[in-house]
């Protein structure tokens, strides 16, 4: 279970919510409403106040890198720090299984990052997060740069994670996608929030 209590930061009013194992919460709202700020605050990537508790462990009680392995933020545009794809994956066997599911050839780890399209970066960013086997995924528009077929493969992978008990908060502008994954929605607008049924 993920419990968020009074989580707030500049541009975001306090938010309280609880997420059950295997549950996905859709996060929706107009551009600039604070959706990405909210996910980044949960991951403790930016200065914020409030408590986030994962399975009775308070975020503030463990080192930030350890927290982010369990509560993984997957941005719409992942960051890269090395020239080749393979250098970004510590667990190559697990990564290879994931990249095959997303229709990458076996030699993808030898590719230079600069040759990747936006959609390829997006899919590999998700694969990178999944190799950590996180308890909770913070997904920031996970299929925004993908065509329908590729997006469907990514959705199937996310659905499999949820079936295995992984929790997710998913930022999306697609109401149909939100309904495929979530029963509840967190609506954000100008930093204000409201939770309701989908």
Image (spheres, rainbow, N blue to C red):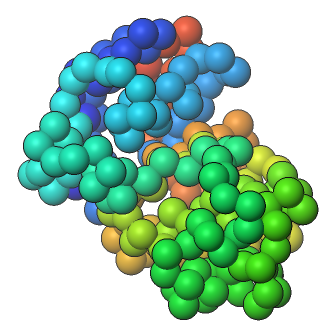
Question: 132 or 107, which lies in front?
Answer: 107
At 68% from the left edge and 44% from the top edge, which residue is drawn?
A: 76
Residue 173 percent coordinates (x, y):
70, 37
Residue 51 percent coordinates (x, y):
19, 31
178, above or below 125, in the image: above
**Residue 72 in sight here:** yes
At 53% from the left edge and 36% from the top edge, which residue is drawn?
A: 27
168, above or below 13, in the image: below
Quadrant hosting residue 98:
bottom right
Does residue 121 appear to the left or right of 165 in the view shown? Answer: right
At 81% from the left edge and 74% from the top edge, which residue is drawn?
A: 111
Question: 88 or 74, which lies in front?
Answer: 88
160, above or below 57, in the image: below
97, above or below 27, in the image: below
**Residue 179 in sight here:** no
Q: Residue furthest front?
A: 83
At 54% from the left edge and 20% from the top edge, which residue is drawn?
A: 34
Residue 119 percent coordinates (x, y):
82, 57
Does residue 159 appear to the left or right of 45 in the view shown? Answer: right
Residue 68 percent coordinates (x, y):
36, 51
Does residue 123 appear to the left or right of 43 in the view shown? Answer: right
Q: Quadrant of the N terminus?
A: bottom left
């Amino acid at each position: 279970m993920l419990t968020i209590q009074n989580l707030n930061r500049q541009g975001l009013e306090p938010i309280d919510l609880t997420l059950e194992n295997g549950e996905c919460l859709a996060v929706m709202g107009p551009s600039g409403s604070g959706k990405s700020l909210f996910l980044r605050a949960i991951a403790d990537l930016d200065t914020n106040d409030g408590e986030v508790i994962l399975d009775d462990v308070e975020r503030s009680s463990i080192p930030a890198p350890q927290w982010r392995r369990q509560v993984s933020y997957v941005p719409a545009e992942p960051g890269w720090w090395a020239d080749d794809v393979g250098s970004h994956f510590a667990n190559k066997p697990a990564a290879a299984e994931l990249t095959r599911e997303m229709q990458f050839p076996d030699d993808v780890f030898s590719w230079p990052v600069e040759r990747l399209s936006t959609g390829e970066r997006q899919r590999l960013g998700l694969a990178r997060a999944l190799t950590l086997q996180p308890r909770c995924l913070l997904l920031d528009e996970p299929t925004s740069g993908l065509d329908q077929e590729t997006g469907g493969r990514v959705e199937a992978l996310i659905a499999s994670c949820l079936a295995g008990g992984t929790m997710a908060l998913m930022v999306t502008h697609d109401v149909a996608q939100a309904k495929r994954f979530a029963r509840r929605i967190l609506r954000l607008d100008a930093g204000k929030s409201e939770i309701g049924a989908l």
